[in-house]
Amino acid sequence: MFNSTIFCRFTSRFLVFFMMFLFSNVDGQTKRKFKVHTIAFYNVENLFDTINDPNKNDEASPMMELKSGRDEIYKKKVVNMANAISKIGSKTSKNAPVIVGISEVENKKVIEDLINDPALKSKNYGIVHYDSPDERGIDVALIYQKALFQPTKTSSHELKLTRSSSGRRDYTRDVLLVSGYLEDDLIHVLVNHWPSRSGGEARSRSKREAAAALNRNLIDSLQKINPNYKIFVMGDLNDNPTNSSLKKFLKTKGDKSKVGYKGLFNPMESFFKKGLGSNAYRDAWSLFDQIIVSKPLLENDYSSFRFYKAGIFNEQFLITKKGQYKGYPFRSFSWGGFTNGYSDHFPVYVHLIKEIN
């Protein structure tokens, strides 16, 4: 039998809420209590400011293409994104995500505006961000609740690509690697936004395979130090869980029982095979947004944090209610205007649990 109750405690002078799960064995004598944290990823769809940066191609962003009202629209966009982030996984954890990887942010300033919105400000998020050389002027980043996660090392890793037609560099997003302590647990998080399918899936496939290979190399380097490291790979991968970039290059498994030594488990694969997705195009769902975990997170020893479950955060307020794109993610920008929506992607998340006495 399963039931739950909620309690709270002070951690590093912050009031942190989490769920306790109570599990009973067959004879009803043993109860086990667990705390829960959420780790999430969200493509926030073109979170650009209203200032023209001469060093970036931000003129092509939906924000800069608006003819009027940019300042007010920017404020609404930030409010909407902060509100969505604050709710990811909260029905179970009773707290905003401890860690959120984000993509499609223009610069550090927009992230600062995001975490200082009233919906998130009380969580006291910190930021890890590096400028990427991406041609669209978009970056990846990581925000984290300072009371619960302390970064110890961060780095940005360039994905070097060339255009097959000209041999020139094809500039895209870097891979962000953040290592640190989730309470007492050392974890490593790779945040990604892989190259798009522009020009077609087959024609652009090698770019995403190269991104997967870069992630695999970073993971191998970490596992060479300690094969028991707890590693998360997250991002908008622009590929589905069954594509070659994931299966052949990153070497993920969709079945926990088949994850071997130094292996990776992709909980999103089962969602995709059930027809679920995080973004839609031409009436077809894709699950480009994924969080993948290393084998040590699957162990049954809950004296430290382990993987509990994953989810696609597709609450009703994030869904388009009418029109041609009814049922799709409620995006922020469409047909050259602001919709007062959120993103063309749903966020994804995983819950981690740890047994408490």
Image: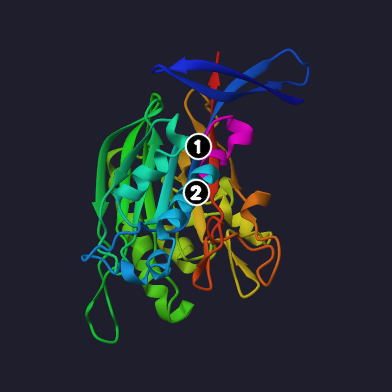
Residue found 27% across the figure and 69% down from its top = 171
Give the residue pinned by disc 1. Answer: 119
- Disc 1 secondary structure class: helix
Residue found 45% across the figure and 29% down from its top = 122
Neighbour tally class for label 2: few under 14, some 14-19, many 20 plus, Cα within 10 Å: many
Residue found 44% across the figure and 50% down from its top = 75
Which image quadrant for residue 46?
bottom left
The furthest residue to the bottom: 165
Q: What separation in Å lies between label 2 and label 1 (alpha carbons)?
A: 9 Å
Name the amino acid type tagged 1: Ala
Q: Please state the horizontal and vertical placement of residue 224, each as a whole percent of the image.
A: 29, 44
Q: Please state the horizontal and vertical placement of residue 352, each as a whole percent of the image.
A: 53, 34
| Residues marked 2 and 1 touching at CB (< 8 Å) | no
Q: Which residues are magenta?
A: 85-96
Q: Please state the horizontal and vertical placement of residue 240, each as a whole percent of the image.
A: 53, 64
Say whether residue 49 is left or right of residue 322. left
Residue found 37% across the figure and 29% down from its top = 146
Q: Which residue is at the front of the view, 26 or 19?
A: 19
Residue 326 sits above or below residue 81 on the image: below
- Disc 2 secondary structure class: helix
Q: Please state the horizontal and vertical placement of residue 184, each as a whole percent of the image.
A: 39, 24
Residue 287 sits above or below residue 39 on the image: below
**Would you say residue 98 sits in the magenta stretch?**
no
Q: Going from the N terminus, do you reach mark 2 or mark 1 first? A: 2
In the rendered structure, find residue 81 and report the number of the disc placed on it: 2
Residue 61 seen: yes
**Would you say residue 93 sits in the magenta stretch?**
yes
Name the amino acid type tagged 2: Met
The number of numbered badges drawn on the structure is: 2
